[in-house]
Image (cartoon, helix red, strand yellow):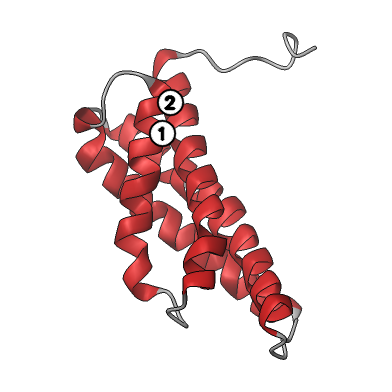
């Protein structure tokens, strides 16, 4: 593995983490507040903090992908599913409050993050990302 590939994976981890774990996590927090009728606050600063935390978690996921990628299987959908499950299992002890609803609401964000990171990283490694000219 080259340093360039590792840096690319970490950067992709940060970007997909900010989007799916950060912004998606903020959405999950709002859904949790609505579902439990708990007061939920919203601020730009709080949202940016959650997005930054998602990016940091995404980098950690990138490190996890670099460490475990060779064990995840060859089929991309299977790699994405296995990696998503691994990330979710690593993260669940930190969920607060630890309620079944929290686990259920965060699962789609981790599934989307894991699939996005594995798919983008795999396509970039093979040089197969579609160019803007080929998009219909």
User: Is 103 located above or below residue 97 in the figure?
Assistant: above
Q: Which residue is mark 2?
A: 77
Q: Position of residue 35 (x, y in %)?
A: 69, 76
Q: Nearer the viewer, residue 65 or 86?
A: 86
Q: CA distance from mark 1 to mark 2?
A: 5 Å
Q: Quadrant of the C terminus?
A: top right
Q: Nearer the viewer, residue 78 or 134?
A: 78
Q: Secondary structure at mark 1?
A: helix
Label placed on residue 3? none
Q: Is residue 6 left or right of residue 136?
A: left
User: Is 44 located above or below residue 116 in the figure?
Assistant: below
Q: Which residue is mark 1?
A: 80
Tell me if label 1 and label 2 are in contact, CB under 8 Å: yes
Q: Residue at x 44, y 62 (%)?
A: 56
Quarter holding residue 132: top right
User: Is 47 located above or below residue 13 in the figure?
Assistant: below
Q: Which residue is farthest bottom?
A: 39
Q: Is residue 86 left or right of residue 39?
A: left
Q: Is residue 62 left or right of residue 119?
A: left
Q: Nearer the viewer, residue 56 or 104?
A: 104
Quarter holding residue 46: bottom right
Q: Secondary structure at mark 2?
A: helix
Q: Position of residue 41 (x, y in %)?
A: 73, 86
Mark 1 neighbour class, 10 Å CA radius: few under 14, some 14 to 19, many 20 or more = many
Q: Quadrant of the N terminus?
A: top left
Q: Residue at x 54, y 58 (%)?
A: 21
- How many dots with numbers? 2
């Amino acid at each position: 593995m080259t340093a360039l590939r590792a840096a690319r994976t970490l950067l992709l981890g940060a970007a997909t983490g900010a989007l799916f774990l950060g912004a998606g996590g903020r959405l999950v927090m709002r859904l949790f507040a609505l579902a439990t009728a708990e007061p939920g606050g919203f601020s730009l600063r709080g949202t940016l903090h959650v997005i930054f935390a998602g990016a940091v978690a995404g980098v950690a996921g990138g490190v996890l992908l670099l460490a475990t990628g060779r064990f995840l299987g060859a089929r991309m959908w299977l790699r994405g599913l296995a990696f998503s499950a691994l990330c979710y299992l690593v993260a669940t002890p930190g969920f607060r409050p630890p309620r079944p609803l929290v686990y259920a609401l965060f699962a789609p964000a981790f599934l989307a993050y894991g699939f996005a990171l594995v798919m983008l990283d795999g396509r970039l490694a093979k040089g197969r990302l579609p160019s803007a000219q080929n998009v219909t």
